[in-house]
Image (cartoon, rainbow, N blue to C red):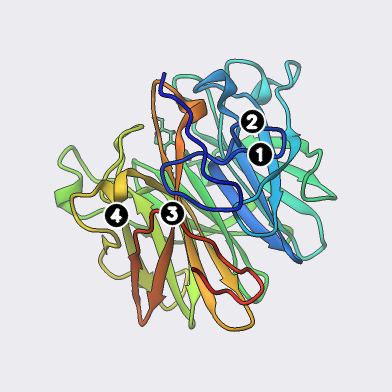
């Protein structure tokens, strides 16, 4: 087990852990992040039990660096089959639907990853507690890693990895509680899938200056790889070819994308890349690799910093 090295409080130090207000390792793995007013809420995989479900942990922060724990937004629940001990729940992603309800989407799976479903839970407050609703294979497709995206007009999308067919962008119903249709599906280039066609996983999407950016990683388990992105004028595509946003061969600075967070400030909009440096022998202590990302003119590029802070009021990173 690796030793747990914390970042200085209030600072993002890629490769070092965030210490929460209780002095514990913040469980911000596979995290989803949304801004609500002047706070950022984060829902992460609590890896106390290693690879199996240990709860969805919720935190909030004014600066993406100082994290206050709100406990479990969704807890291990022995009498709910999807949430029982020994199950797999990954990549909790929350959107607030147009009616004001917080909707959590989840990768719901069995310990052997054979179930491959997406699940839903709802709450009236960002920190929950969430009421678990159900899981399904969207439109009958397998679904493992997921991401979510809400467009400016309120349309919600589920991004879902289906290795039999590719990475799907599904349009959600108006209340985000069900899947309506696939609007686009992308495949990795043949060089990335010698064993047969597949898309990317750990998907996330942003919109910058009217252009949509879709990020994902190759399918290499807990090992990191050179993550990619594609762009399109609409979530329905057509998507560009996939390309690197970190130095090729760096395995995305040894991390896997979880989300990219836009920080709209009074002076500028900054983008924060939020990645996981998984340690399969110590998932609990796997380090965050969070970095400024330059996004403009259809290009996205990570910028390495040993340590940094962001003024979330102005949007300025230093
Ligand atoms: C890669 C996924 O991105 C992770 O969330 C996790 O499911 C691992 N695979 C498990 O090997």
* C-alpha gap between disc 3 and disc 4: 9 Å
Secondary structure at numbered mark 1? loop
Q: Which mark is residue 46?
A: none
- Picture residue at 60% right of the left edge, 24% below the top: 53
CB-based contact (under 8 Å), mark 2 and mark 1 = yes
Residue ID for mark 4: 187
Can residue 173 be seen here? The reply is: no
Q: Whole-percent x and y of residue 161? A: 42, 45
* C-alpha gap between disc 2 and disc 4: 39 Å
Which of marks 4 and 2 precedes in the sequence? 2
* C-alpha gap between disc 3 and disc 2: 36 Å
- Picture residue at 35% right of the left edge, 41% below the top: 163
In this view, the mark in front (4 or 1): 1
Q: Which mark is residue 24?
A: 2
Rendered position, 147 above or below 309: above
Which of marks 4 and 3 precedes in the sequence? 3
Secondary structure at numbered mark 2? loop
In this view, the mark in front (2 or 4): 2
Residue ID for mark 1: 20
Which of marks 2 and 3 precedes in the sequence? 2
Residue ID for mark 3: 168
Q: Whole-percent x and y of residue 281? A: 39, 20
């Amino acid at each position: 087990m690796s030793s747990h090295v914390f970042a200085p409080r209030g600072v993002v130090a890629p490769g070092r852990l965030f210490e929460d207000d209780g002095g514990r390792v913040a469980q911000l793995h596979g995290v989803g992040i949304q801004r609500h007013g002047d706070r950022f809420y984060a829902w992460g995989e609590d890896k106390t039990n290693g690879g199996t479900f240990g709860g969805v942990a919720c935190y909030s922060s004014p600066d993406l660096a100082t994290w206050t724990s709100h406990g479990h937004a969704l807890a291990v629940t022995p009498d709910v089959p999807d949430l029982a001990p020994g199950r797999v729940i990954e990549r909790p992603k929350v959107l607030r639907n147009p009616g004001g309800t917080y909707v959590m989407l989840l990768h719901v799976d069995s310990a052997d990853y054979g179930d491959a479903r997406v699940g839903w839970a709802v709450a009236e407050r960002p920190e929950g507690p969430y009421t678990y609703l159900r899981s399904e294979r969207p439109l009958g497709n397998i679904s493992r890693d997921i991401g979510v995206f809400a467009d400016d007009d309120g349309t919600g999308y589920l991004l879902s990895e289906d290795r039999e067919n590719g990475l799907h962008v599904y349009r959600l119903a108006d209340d985000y509680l069900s899947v309506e249709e696939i609007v686009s599906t992308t495949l990795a280039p043949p060089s990335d899938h010698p064993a047969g066609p597949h898309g990317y996983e750990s998907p996330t999407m942003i919109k910058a200056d009217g252009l949509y950016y879709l990020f994902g990683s190759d399918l290499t388990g807990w090992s990191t790889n050179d993550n990619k992105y594609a762009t399109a004028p609409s979530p329905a595509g057509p998507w560009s070819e996939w390309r690197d946003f970190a130095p090729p061969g760096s395995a995305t600075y040894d991390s896997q994308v979880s989300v990219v967070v836009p920080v709209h400030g009074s002076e500028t909009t900054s983008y924060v890349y939020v990645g996981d440096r998984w340690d399969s022998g110590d998932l609990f202590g796997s380090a965050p690799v969070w970095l400024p990302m330059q996004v403009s003119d259809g290009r996205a590029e990570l910028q390495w910093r040993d340590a940094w802070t962001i003024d979330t009021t102005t949007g300025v990173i230093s």
